Image: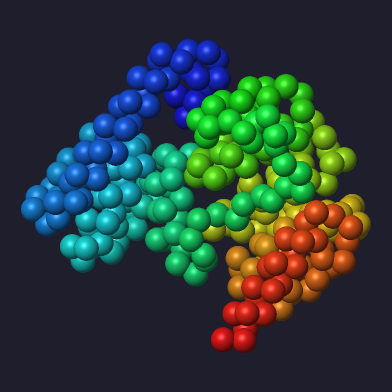
Amino acid sequence: RRAARLHARGSRAAAQAIFARQDELQARAAAAISAWPAGSLEQLEELGQAHPRSGAVQFHLGLARFWKGDTTGAFEAWRAARTRDPDTAFAVKASDLLFRGFPAGLPTFVPSFRAPRSVQSLPAPRQLRELERRARRPDAHAKLLYGLALQRLERPVSARRQYAAAARLAPEDPEARVADAIGRFDKQRPERSFSRLGPLTRRFPRAATVRFHLGLLLLWLGNVEEARRQLERARALPSPLSGEAKRLLTRLEEVRAR
């Protein structure tokens, strides 16, 4: 998070130094676990003591403890990865292991619009930089697109900030409000999303994005029948998302027919 703040303020050299140290820690943690069981747990315990806020270290330490039969210690390390280094893929993966009743990963916002062709045609690293540049402007859709890119990179906290900024900038835009709700999803507290998304069905009754994402979150909770009803409503509304809703409904039928 400190590196992200430095990067946002223009201190890129300092940010890159922090990122480099993180990359080194990830490599050391991965090397230790790949050598299992030859000293893996001992090495990771040492790394965990030295770097208690590293999601990479805590995640791999949890794996080593779990494989050693220490379930309590494993959960403790995974909770540390989740809470101490939340804006990382390791926090997301730790949540997957802590909350096994959910699908892997996190629900992703699906916009009804796309980035301009001039952005889509760029190579991936340049595309991300361009999305970041555009998101600095007072443009809600630009912030939503950058937030989506961050979600796909498994940086949930950074994505949540972009979605929240878009919602503050455009409170009457249902897509911004929906993205803000989706970005707040937490497997330990899914109500953080539902408490914001549910009321939007009354505020924006003709917005397909509300019904579509409500259906999507209900699928994450395993409530298939209610999810299907919400997706049917989304499909019936005039929106590019009606096609996405139809594809999800078709997939649900295929799964049920097996």
Image quadrant holding the C terminus, namely bottom right
Colouring of the image: rainbow
Residue 31 image point, x, y percent: 19, 44
Does any portion of residue 249 appear in the rendered image? Answer: yes
Residue 164 can be seen, yes or no: no
Question: Looking at the image, is 147 positioned above or below residue 8?
Answer: below
Q: Is residue 231 left or right of residue 56?
A: right
Residue 143 vertical position relative to residue 242 in the rendered view, above or below: above
Residue 100 drawn at (x, y percent):
45, 67
Name the residue: 53% across, 13% down: 10
**Left or right: residue 142 compared with residue 242:** left
Instruction: Give the residue displayed 80% in from the left and 54% down from the top.
Output: 240
**Residue found at x 66% / y 62%:** 217
- Residue 70, horizontal then vertical, whole percent: 23, 62
Q: How many marks?
A: 0
Q: Quadrant of residue 202?
A: bottom right
